[in-house]
Amino acid sequence: MFEPKGIITIDGPSGAGKSTISRGLAAKLHFTYLDTGAMYRAVGLALERQGIDLADTESLTQCLAAIELTLSPNGDEDVRVALNGEDVSQAIRTPEMGMVASRVSAHPLVREKLTALQRQLGEEGGIVAEGRDMGTVVFPKAFCKFFLNASAEERARRRQKQLAEKGQSVDYQEILDQISKRDYDDSMREHAPLKPAADAIIVDSSSMNPQAVIEYMLACIANPAP
Ligand code: DC
């Protein structure tokens, strides 16, 4: 049964359309959209700026303790992210920061901090949470879980178009290589790897437009499997 204060999770690899779909689904349901990739990106930025060596547990712990993140919805656009009060929304949305986020996200201390914050943000329910481990680790009791996928080639094509719309011109092969590396690293890591939850509904969006994916998900939410 549909839970007005429930949690919906959407996991999947980079470029599968999770942000557009999660934002659209949240708007339809009057839920809050939680972009957890943005959180890993912001933490990656903070650690990189301070030149923190992930092997130096003491410096990492200190740096993480001093990080304060605030996420605010931004209509049809990407959520706005403040890192200790500074708006880093643009700085975190580059392919390079995606790679940095993927690297730092493999560290258990980084995951511990963000998992706690994500659960806190989800406490009141009524959220669509997007990421890699939402259905498996952060919100295992979510009432509806999706795993959104698309072929690597299709995801690279979409990502290139998205970046072009923001005025960033990046070579297709370079994007495809980055996507493949991130898929591999995010899936093979020890802590909270990218994988579908056992009870997730797998959606392949390779030949579906965002509207069709949202309609399909709404139908699944309205008529969950027994
Ligand atoms: O969704 P994104 O591209 O903004 O995510 C950037 C990286 O952050 C991704 O490659 C892996 C990491 N991430 C994660 O480990 N767990 C999440 N729930 C979300 C993102």
Image: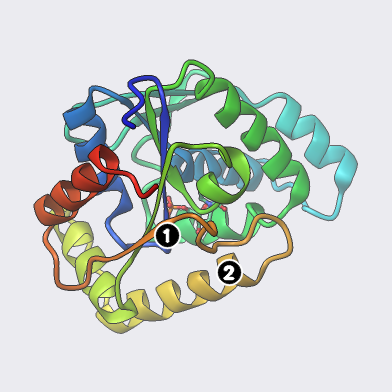
Q: Are marks 2 and 1 in contact (CB under 8 Å)?
A: no
Q: Is residue 172 visible?
A: yes
Q: Residues within 10 Å of mark 2 (few under 14, many from 20)?
A: some
- The N terminus appears in which quarter of the rendering? top left
Judged left or right of residue 77, residue 119 is: right
Upstream in the sequence, badge 2 or badge 1? Answer: 1
In front here: 155 or 196? 196
Q: Which residue is painted at 56% across and 37% down in the image?
A: 141
Q: Taking 98 as reference, is 186 above or below it? A: below
The CA span between labels 2 and 1 is 10 Å
Say which mark, if any, is on residue 106. Answer: none
In front here: 56 or 162? 162
Say which mark, if any, is on residue 187. Answer: 2
Helix, strand or loop status at disc 2: helix
Q: Which residue is painted at 28% across and 70% down in the image?
A: 155
Position of residue 189 measured from the top left corner of the image (x, y, whole percent): 68, 66
Judged left or right of residue 153, residue 178 is: right
Position of residue 118 measured from the top left corner of the image (x, y, whole percent): 56, 30
Image quadrant where residue 164 sits? bottom left
- Residue at the limit of the structure toward the front, as seen here: 226
Q: Amino acid at mark 1?
A: Gly
Position of residue 137 measured from the top left corner of the image (x, y, whole percent): 63, 46
Q: Mark 1 highlights which residue?
A: 12
Position of residue 209 measured from the top left corner of the image (x, y, whole percent): 11, 60
Q: Amino acid at mark 2?
A: Ser
Q: Residues within 10 Å of mark 1 (few under 14, many from 20)?
A: many
Helix, strand or loop status at disc 1: loop
Q: Taking 14 as reference, is 42 above or below it? A: above
In front here: 171 or 151? 151
Q: Is residue 20 visible?
A: no
